[in-house]
Amino acid sequence: MGFEIEISNLKKNYSYLTAISDLNARLEKGDFITLFGPNGAGKSTLLKILSTLLKPSEGNVVISGHDLGKNRNEIRKIIGFVSHQNMLYENLTAFENLKFISTFYSIKKPDEICGKLLQDIGLYERRSDPVKTFSSGMKQRLSIARTLINNPKILFLDEPYNGLDQEGIESFSSILSDLKSKGHTIFLTTHNIDEGLELSDRLMILNKGKLVFDQKNIYRKEEFKEIYFSVLKN
Amino acid sequence: MNKIAAIFWKDIITEIRSKEIFPIMLIFGILILLIFNFAFEFRSEITPNAISAMLWITFIFAGLLSLSRSFALEKENDALLSLVITPADKTYIYIGKLLSNFVLVFLMELIIIPVFILFFNLDFSSNLLSVLGVVALGTFGFIAIGTFFSSMALNTKMKELMLPVLTFPIIIPVIITSVKICSSILDGKDFSQYKSSLQVLVTFDIIFAVACAVLFEYLIEDS
């Protein structure tokens, strides 16, 4: 199986701190990777670099054969990014939000695709309602539909469960499970061990900008919790 | 072209639904006119230069309200990131925003001008179209720069304060030229007397719009 994402000697320095330090990783196609770490560990910075929103200070990233430094737009065609901010326009309807963003990917038959995505996430009945009338869970589901508009091979999810209630978490997890079964490579970050562990093929822990744990997921929740806290202590 | 239209449509439809900017901009503009009206005590001997200056002061201060909200809307829910992460050329975002800001501010000006005429008991009838033409050109230059700095001020802590501080020094040539031309028109001067100023204004508009469009991509993408 080929590597979908190759990260070599990645560093990101801000003027006041080093957010990522000498990070190396190779992620396989179709894997569901969950990156755990406490607040301020550098998870969001790493995800923003991988999703082309930040430039690294040093190092190299190759995504699906495209060098991040040279082919940013090629990478943007095949990735999607979801964060705890839903990136939606509150005064537009669910359908308008999807159709608006579809323009920027030059999608053919946007009405058809937007309608299908809304059906997939269970919001078709609410397609004509403004997003500001939606619950957090509905907004997050719509946010993932927005991300799927260009049918990306790779999905980067930055703390997507933040602010969701239990129902929202379950609904979102079911969408992720569906995406995993369709072969998308999914890279999720979270500081909450209860989230995403079941779906994950591979577990990583980032602490103070360093990758301190990187293993296949063979762990039960309690087992991994122990590992997580012991790794953070060291 | 579709992308520019999409940004334009999104901004206009958002304003129609939220009514966040336009009514405030209009009320603020009329309040400025009221202050001028009381300050000049309804005198009829106000010079064309003063009339022109009052109009432009009103336009600029009221217009800045629209500009300060322009990119703030994109910051809500980090919506701008969803555009930045697309493979599309980011210049489209700037042009779409420039057009939507221009339409909103010019519409405000179209309402302000009759109110101004009414407040100061003026007669613009013979040169109204010429004044409107200059107002459109001056506004375009102002909005071209303001839209750019609105995006620049977005990530600063005091964005509402930063916008005028960044914008005013750069728009001075556009505003001075616009005031001069309007004043000449209201004074009944012949076209040949302000033709060169008009050429300067058009040149400023083109230079500012092109420079801002080119620089916008560098501004919006993280370095």
Image (spheres, coloured by chain):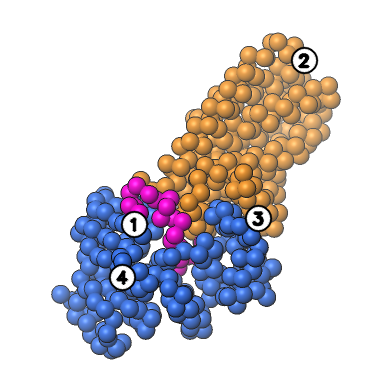
Chain colours: A blue, B orange
Point out the residue furthest to the left here.
A234
**Which residue is identified by label 3?**
B14
Q: In this view, does B166 lie above or below A98?
A: above
Provide the secondary structure element on which disc 2 rests: loop
What is the CA distance from the residue labelled 4 to the residue labelled 2?
79 Å
* Dot label at residue A1: 4
Provide the secondary structure element on which disc 4 rests: loop
Q: Is residue A66 left or right of residue B212?
A: left
**Which residue is identified by label 1?**
A65
Q: How crowded is mark 3: few (under 14 residues within 10 Å), some or many (20 or more)?
A: some
Is the residue at mark 3 from the same chain as the one at mark 2? yes
Q: Is residue A230 above or below residue B214?
A: below
What is the CA distance from the residue labelled 1 to the residue labelled 3?
40 Å
Query: In front of the other: label 1 or label 3?
Result: 1
Residue depicted at x 59% and y 48%? B3
Q: How crowded is mark 2: few (under 14 residues within 10 Å), some or many (20 or more)?
A: few
Range of magenta residues: A66-87
Point out the residue furthest to the front here.
A1
Q: In which quarter of the image is the C terminus of chain A?
A: bottom left
Is the residue at mark 1 from the same chain as the one at mark 2? no
What is the CA distance from the residue labelled 4 to the residue labelled 3?
47 Å
Which of the pair A62/B102 is nearer the observer? A62
Which chain is home to disc 4? A
Is the residue at mark 4 from the same chain as the one at mark 2? no
Residue depicted at x 64% and y 69%? A115
What is the CA distance from the residue labelled 1 to the residue labelled 2?
67 Å
N-terminal of the pair, mark 3 or mark 2, is: 3
As for residue A68 lying within the magenta part, the answer is yes
What amino acid type should be assigned to the residue bearing mark 1?
Answer: Gly
